[in-house]
Image (cartoon, rainbow, N blue to C red):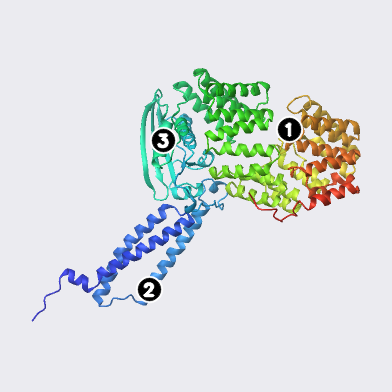
Amino acid sequence: MNETAPGFFARLKQRKLVQWALAYVAFAFALLQGVDIVAQRFAWPDQLERILILALAIGFFFAIVLAWYHGERGAQRVTGTELLILALLLATGGGLLWRFERTTSATSSPDAAQRNPGAILPMTPIAAIPAKSIAVLPFENLSGDKDNAYFADGMQDLILTKLADIGDLKVISRTSTAKYESRPDNLKTIARQLGVATILEGSVQKAGNQVLINVQLIDAHSDNHLWAESYTRTLDNIFGVEGEVAQKVADALKAKLSPADTARVTAIPTRNPEAYDLFLQGRYLFQQLQTASARDPIAVGKEATDVYVRAVAADPQFALAYAQLSYLRSYLHWYGIDRSAAVVDGARDAAERALALQPDLPEAHLAMGYFHYWCHRDYAAALREFDIARAGMPNNAEVIAAIGYVHRRQGVPDMGIPEMQQASVLDPRDSTLPREIANSYASMRRYADADAAYARSLAIFPGDTEARVQRATSMMFSGDLPTAERMLAAVPADMDPQASVSLLRFRLAMIQRKPDAALAVIAHAPDWLMTRWEHSVAPLGLLRGQAFAMKGETDLARAAFLQAEQALHTEIQDPETAIDASSYLGLVYAGLGEKQAALKAARSAVDRLPMSRDPIVGAFQLERMARVEAQVGETGSAIDHLRQLLDSASGETVSVATLRIDPVWDPLRKDPRFQALLKKYAKDEPAPGVRAGASH
């Protein structure tokens, strides 16, 4: 009697295809969970997991075919050959994943691929990322006219600023978010680099009077959209969009707004379309100056000033524009782009006008703080204004960092380091902040701590020549001359802005008593070489004279000193350069053997800018005066001034290490008071390579 052929489902059961399918699904689920954990640890992009899911889906089909094949043969086990093939496939896949991980880690930074393909940015642990945290990426400019890029940039900046006004949020600074593309694929990686849970993307399309703004809030870990909105406006009614977006984002993140927060977020700075558009243009130009992307700072500074002036002319009640105009003018003065008296007066007038219009406007207090800081070195007044600004802009990294810088200018850098560290959390991609932290450590003669901070700065931006030079300077003052030389050797020859790197190489050679090497370094230098900290310029003739004097070539030294004297007499007529010129003139006269003239010039510089007014720049004036005194035989006074410097945070003017080896101080070496000075302060200054206390 013939048996009835088994049905289809019976045959599936006979070949255990259901069990195979369930086992495969369980295996795939476990694998995906494991890969997800590893992907978070190494910040792999989301595409990798998507590819793996697709591969597992395809693999499911082959697993079922394999199960059917073995079922037909009556064997429900995989042969050794098949196991070997499977192992080879897994090994190959694992190797590809490993290589993919190495590649993505090395290129996870948008600019790392351009500046240093091997740079790896640190990733914030997911558990340490607050839920109420956000980064606003650059808005995409969809306008047909690329000249409208300022408008998209301005909208992103205004929305970010409004979000930063909310105390319950962690908001990443524009300096860091500007490093990324508008719509990147690796949101999870970016979020880990910035230490945020959410990302705000947007686009702006401007055509004539019509504006279309699209924004979307994304959960960076899950890639889910939390909120999205489109705003179709005209330039006549675009005012307040940034506040609306900030309010919606705050609601989506369940952020609590205080009444003051709400007032700041909903405030509309102007209802004048022309003034609003000019204001956005001015911000765009100013940001070019701040990011050093302006090819002609003088021209860009003038253009930005003119645009802001036109904005406040279009709306005389536009307090925010007045504040930005003041800030810009103070910036132009401090960085030497325009040191005219009119710029200083204009900075004060614009800040006062902004405060008169809106006494509680944080940006106005920020501007007034910078006026006191950059135009008059009135650090106490600057600190009062910055404290007010910080209360109104609790997430503004610039304000927080400015407070740290002021503390350093007041001679208490240890008070400013925590502020700069907090600012660095809000601006993690800005290499300037760890570099400035390093400078503060170096000023306290904590050279090992400084070196670690310089390393962090260079990890963010390996191409930062200034950080490399400052790191070498710190090593020189720590007494580690070979390391300082190696660091300077790594700086490309064409990276020498106004011979500032050459000046440090010259100084290093002179400390090592190598005048020929020092002369070779400055053989092709310009007539004036830029010094780093105080932004002064040293005359080439002075340096050549010092090197020739060390060689014993008296006639050549005298000729070089006389050349420097002539150049400095021109500089001393300018109020903006007179102090530095007088200080350098003291060294020139000392080289010429004119004792009284040398002492008079050096004392004039110290009297006009004492350390009590500016502990940083004033220390350079005092150190040069001590050099003059040592050279002309005023030993006691020189030692007293060195003691004053060693008692202060001036670790990049003098250190025990450089006092021991620099030939400048040879005239003091046999004096018991000098030896006692070295012995007293040596115990407080760590030897090279020894860590001096824990970081703040």
Q: Nearer the viewer, mark 3 or mark 2?
A: 3
- Is the residue under label 2 in contact with that under label 3 (CB below 8 Å)? no
Q: Residues within 10 Å of mark 1 (few under 14, many from 20)?
A: some
Given residues 62 and 628, the one toward you in this image is 628
Which residue does the numbered mark 3 point to in the structure image? Answer: 247
Q: Residues within 10 Å of mark 2 (few under 14, many from 20)?
A: few
Kind of residue at badge 3: Gln
Mark 1 residue element: loop
Does any portion of residue 132 appear in the rendered image?
yes
Mark 2 residue element: helix
Residue 625 tag number:
none
Kind of residue at badge 2: Leu
- Is the residue under label 1 in contact with that under label 2 (CB below 8 Å)? no
Which residue does the numbered mark 1 point to in the structure image? Answer: 613
Does any portion of residue 331 appear in the rendered image?
no
Mark 3 residue element: helix
Q: In which quarter of the view is residue 688 placed?
A: bottom right
Using the numbered discs, state the Cα–Cα distance from disc 1 to disc 3 in whole angstroms: 44 Å
Which residue does the numbered mark 2 point to in the structure image? Answer: 83
